[in-house]
Each structure stands twice: as structure tokens, then as C-alpha cells.
Amino acid sequence: MTARLLLAASILLGLSGAAVAENPTAESLSGVYPGKAYSPWADRNFPSLPLWGDSHLHTALSMDAGLFGARLGPEQAYRLARGEQVVSSTGQPVKLARPLDWLVIADHSDGLGMIQDIASGAPEIVAFEQGKRWAEGFEAGGEKAVAAALDLISAFAQGKVDPKLLAQYSPGSPKYASVWEMNVRLAEAYNEPGRFTTLIGFEWTSLVEGNNLHRNVILRDGAERAKEIVPYTTQPPIGSTDPLDLYAWLENYEAKTGGSALAIAHNGNLSNGLMFPVDAQYTGRPLDALYVEQRGKWEPLYEVTQTKGTGEAHPFLSPDDAFADFELWDVGNLDLTAAKTPGMLQYEYAREALKNGLLLEGRFGANPYKFGMIGSTDSHTALSTAEEDNFFGKHSGQEPKPDRMSHSFSKTEHGQFEGWQVSASGMAAVWALENTREAIFDAMERKEVYGTTGPRMIVRFFGGWSFIAEDLNSRQPAFLGYQKGVPMGSDLRPREGAASPSFMVYALRDPIGANLDRIQIVKGWLDAEGKTHEKVYDVAWSSGRQPDANGVLPPVGTTVDLAAANWTNTIGASELGTVWSDPDFDPAEPAFYYARVIEIPTPRWIVYDAFRFGVPIPQGADAIHQERAYTAPIWYTPGS
Amino acid sequence: MPRARKLCLSLALAAGLATGPASACGYHQPVDVERGILNLVYPDALYVTTAVWQAEQAGHLGGARPAGLAAAQDPFAFHGEARRLERLGERLAQAAPQELSGFSLVLIESMLWTRYTLAYGRALSAVHSDGRGEGDTVVVTHGLVVRALVEGRLDGERALQLGLLRLYGEAEDVARIEMLLTSLRASGS
């Protein structure tokens, strides 16, 4: 016991990648635990709990949220997130099962705050013929309201908004600055370091012919620096839809304020092949060293799952992955003005991007797609709800009501998304040292994050060269994890003479959620011929099953009772963990590894709707799924 | 520009939030944007949607809910709805003591507007009107509420209490229309 305590104490500083003997001597322990406190958690320099948050929430200040009836602003959004009960835009009381630890209100920067002024006929609007027409149309209702809304939207999409009117709601105008200042002020008011963090941000809403290139911009800083700027927009002449221009804006923000910022790419599943270019950017300009360097620098994270589907993997790209077919939105681009073709998928999904990142690093010397994965909601209700049994929809028109699952979400001649397809997803887990803006941002920067489709399972993932099975027995895998290896989001440096890297992975189920089916490690690599590959390994699973002769692990089964909208934790495991070594490792091949943790089957939100409203589930709708977590990868680069 | 194309642009701006091809009446396609705008211009109009399903679950509305999409696709559904809206006008007119300024009623699920002019026991009901009449008080409700009111299964006062009818306009006009609505009595009450 003494030896074990000493061992735990010895690793509190978690020196990443340091080689340590299995039986430390007193000399070797000297200095690694400066406080010499009895508490094993005192003076530690690694995070002990993930902080849960949402990096992508819209309020009524976003034009589209307003057009769909959202009336809740940032204050209500913060109040709900920190655990209070609020009343939704459709008059329903709502409260989260558990508060969030942090929140980013990421309203669309273009037209920020404009929709409320149109609806109220504000002087800044009605002073212009176009604005007056819209305000009067809204007020009249019926055909006139629809015509006004479509005219407004069309004018925005075609760049035909009266430049003087647009200028009122664009960078450089007092009005725009005042809306931003209000957002910043509210973020300050609700920021409680140590308890609940409000990170200041916005969504840069780049849309190229309906293809989604949105990014959420997050600042590390508080009001003092945030007030020195206003959000970057996409409408010319001030804004741009080109990510390179966003990167320049971020660079300028840091230079001007001395602060720090980053961008998180929106789930790319609706970008129709533009989110992760390999050969040419959407502008037609070939990918070059500037692009790969800038993207890698400013985009450390990727939003892999949200209400508009999950974008980790696709069955077309990963036919051997039995779990790739999950919450897919793959019929078209964001506005369904163009159908999806199979050739686009390789430039939209995270796993493929991670693989292509290895390829591009070989070509340019930098990896543009070296990102950690998170989930966030992208809800347009000011309500960050990602719980299946407490889901308030994508937008206010989709808040709980009997017909929301059967009501078409979007539909054009190119395809359609049904209401039931909207996902109650996702969540971002950040391994931050403390609950502050700075610590959360820094964890994002170092990619020590993971995303889930809603549940709050705890996931640890470390890579190293000397992990052994006994390392998991400490009950504190992080202590040895940080000491003997590197955490999720890191680079595992090559080690001379090492046979194969080993990975310690541990998952504990959401305390009020479902048991775990399995943990998988997903590997991607680049071979000597410059071809990318992937393989999914089942590395830990609940008892009672063995892989068959082909190495396929049987399904865990299901306990879902659709009629009762319930399930039981009588299958699966409450925790899973293992130390796994890559049996196919080639030290000459660049590779990445990430963990995917899969829950036992549980009901989707539509099952709770069916139960509570007494309505049938639409034919063909997915009623049961297996929720999951995706860790940030650990990268191995030969010669690094 | 074709309407469908315009809609596509709407989706573009709306971050993927979409409706079907827009028309003013939900019997052709749902009109999510129009409903959203209604909630902006007439604050909390969407509360009616919640009040309706809550009233249904509590048994206040009685009768079975017509299947949502099936009703919208039913070519006779509109005629039935229009007839009920006219009957609502007739019932209100019986209680109208004098000429009232008109009011406009919108069904939140279909965004079907009806303009009423009531005077001395007579009603003029313009079903499928082009939005709110000039200067009208606006009544936001739901087709199931209208059905329950005209069939005598719900009285106006209770409907107001339950939030199944929400009124917007000048205070005096709102008070007059509220008074009128409370004159609707359920059978046996």
C-alpha cells in the first residue's frame, strides 16, 4: 500500500512521456510532488474531471433563430445552462438534468440583432425603404409576412441588402457594436470562475452556394479585450466567406488585443465536399503551405456531432465499421440546394480528414487536420439541450409538441430531412485544470477534449510506450497516464527500440445514463506508398461475449422498451478499461489513434415524444441508437 | 426567381433550418417561417401550440386529434376548417351587441388567417384572408380550439384561461374581443 501511495504521489506532476521505472526509488520521487501533501490531488498539474459544455448555441439574436420564433436571449441561455429553470419560446418550463460547466453563445455574426429590430419596426430599419417593407410585412402577417421573410432572406443571400441598411448591422456601426457589447456584458455578468464559465464567441457563417463552412470563434479573453473588436462577418465588403480571411482576422485580433482566439469548424456533413479540402480550396486555389499551416494553427478542434447529425465516419468511406452508420445527414448541402454525391463524402467526415491530414503533412510539412473532436448542440432556441428525454429541438418551431417528429425539417427537390432525424446531440468535454475561461481555452488549444452525442461518460485516453495492464488497477488511471504517456490530443514521440505503442483507455458511464457496450480504438495511418488506411479495434467490452472466428464481437443486445420509453442497465458495463498495444504498428508509418466509447442501445428522443404525447413513431424512423463518445486522437509521427 | 429557389436561399441563411415551399396556408405546406415571425411580432404566440397539447392531454379539448400530416393532405380538411371558422363567427355575432371593429384570427398550426366583421347578430367571415386586417386585433389560436368552441365542448372563458386564445392589439379592443369570446358557452354550461 505504501509503495502504491508513493507511486501515485510520484506521478502527480504527470510529466508527459517521461520514462519511469515501474518501482520508483525514493530518489526518483524527490521533487515530483513539491507540496508533499497527503491528498493525492493536491498540487497536481493535470485535470481531474472533464468540464461539460456547449460551444455552439444560438439565441434570438441570430437572424434564423428569430425567424423560427426564438425569443430567448443570452440571459435565459446562461440561466438554463447553469442549472436554472426557464420558460422556452413556446411557453414550456425547461431545466437541464445537470448544469453545464461552461457555455459559448455563438450567434451568427452577420445581421446580429437585426431580426428583432425588423419585428419591432425600429427606426434603424424603417428609415430604409427595404427595411420598412420587411417590418410592415412582418406586422401584417400572412402572405405579406412570408413574402417579407423570403425577400429578406433572398436579399441577404444575394448580397442585395441596401448597403446603408446593412451597414447599420455590420462592423463599424454603433448599432452593431452595441449588440456585441451587450453580449459581452452579459457574458461577464454570468461568468463565475470556478463554477460556471461563459466563453465569449460568435459564429462566422460562411456559406458557399449553400455549402456549410461555418466556424465558431472562441475568445480566451474577457470583456476588456472582447470589447476592442466586433465579430467578423461574411458579407462584403467588410466580411468574407474565405476561411483564410477568418484566419487573418484571428491573427489581427491577437495582435491588436494581446488576447487569444481559436475557431472550431462546424460539422462538415452539409458542406458538400468543401469542409476538408485535399487538392483545392473552394475558391479554386490549390492547397498550399499557407492554408495547411493556417488551418492547423487556428482550428485545433472539430465539431463532430450536433443536432444536424454526426460526422465522424460514413459507411461509404468505412464499410468495415459496423458503427459508422450513426445519425447521418447525407442527402445534400445545408440548404438542400444541391444533392450529395458519394465523391463528396471523403471531404466531409472527420476520420477521413484525419487520414488526409497525414497525407497533407507529408506533402506540405504541416497537418491542417490535426484536430480534437467535440460535440455541441447548434441549437437555435437558446436552450442547450442534448438529452434524449429532455430535447427542445433544433429551433423554436421544433420545441416539444406532438407532431414535431413527423414534421419535415427541410425539403427541396434535392432531398429532405425529416423532423425525427434531428439529433439530440452533442456535448463537449474539456479536460481543463479549473473552470475558468483561460483553463478551458487552454485545454481546447492542446486538444485535450472529447465529444459525446449527449451522455456524460468520463473517458481517459493515454498513449505511451510502456503501459501495462496493471496500470489500470490504480483506480486513478490519470496518474500513471500522465506520467508514462501523453493524453488525448497529443503527439506520441517515437521511441528508439520500442516495439509498439500502448494505449491506456478507460471509460466510466454517465452516472444517470446507460451502461457501456464497448470501447474501440480507431487507427488511421499512411503507408509508404502514400495511401491512407483505417482500422477499428474492439479493445474492451462488457462481459459475456467473445469475438467470433472473424474477430467480430457480437452485439451487446438491447433492453429498450419502446412502449414504456425506457431501458435497463442489465446489460453492458458501468466501466470499461484496458491497455492495448497496436498489433499492426509500423514505426515508419505516420498514424493517429482515437477512442470511441459506445453505450448500450437506448431510445432516441422520438421515443420519449411518442410516449409522452401518445403519438406513433413515423415508419422508418430510427427509434433506438447507441450513443457514444469520441476522444481527440493521439498522433504518431516518425522522425518527430 | 421561383419560389422553391427563394426557399433554398432561406435555408442557406437559416443555417439549415427549413420549411417546405412557402405559401400562406399550411394546407399546402407547413409555414414554419411565418409561424416564427408571428412569435416575434406577437410575442409568445407560440405559447398556444404548447397550451393546445397540454389541454388535449388534460382532456379539455375532447375528441381525437386529426392526424397531422394526413389532415393537411386531406382535400376536404380545408373545407371543414373553413366551415368551423364561419360557425365561430356566427356564434360570436349572436353575442355582438353592436358593431365591433373587425378582428383577425390565425390558426397557429396552419397559419390560416380569417378576418371577422361582426355587427348586430350578423357575421362576415373572410376565411383564408391575406394576413391581419388593417388595425385589427389579432387572435392566435388552433384549429382544435375552434373545433371545440363551435361544437360546444369548450367555453370561451376557459379557453382564454388555458392560453388557448391569445389576443394582441390595443388594450380596449382586446378587452372587447375578450368579452365577446367569453360569451361562447359550452353545451350544458
Image (cartoon, rainbow, N blue to C red):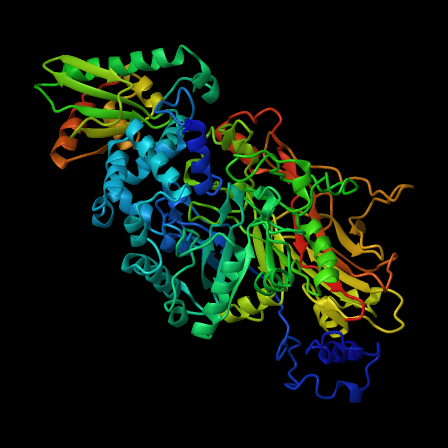
The relative height of residue A588 versus residue A124 in the rendered view (above or below) is below
User: Which of A4 and A301 lies nearest the eye of the viewer?
Assistant: A301
Quadrant assignment for the N terminus of chain A: bottom right
Which residue extends farthest right?
A549
Residue A562: x and y in percent read: 62, 31
Residue A187 spot, x, y in % from top left: 39, 62
Confirm whether residue A83 shows in the render. Answer: yes
Q: Is residue A26 left or right of residue A113?
A: right
- Residue that appears at 60% across and 51% down: A281
* Residue A193 seen in the current view: no
Instruction: Reply above or below: B116 against B160.
Output: above
- Judging depth in this view, the residue of A135 and A559 nearest the camera is A135
Judged from this view, the residue extending furthest toward the front is A285
Q: Is residue A568 left or right of residue B132?
A: right
- Name the residue furthest left: B98
Q: Is residue A552 above or below residue A292?
A: above
Q: Nearer the viewer, residue B1 or B130?
A: B1
In the picture, the quarter occupied by the C terminus of chain A is: bottom right
> Relative to A145, is A225 above or below?
below
Q: Residue at x 34, y 55 (%)?
A: A170
Res A327 quadrant in image: top right
Q: Position of residue A466 (x, y in %)?
A: 83, 70
At 22% from the left edge and 21% from the top edge, which residue is drawn? B115
Q: Left or right? Give the position of B47 relative to A195.
A: left
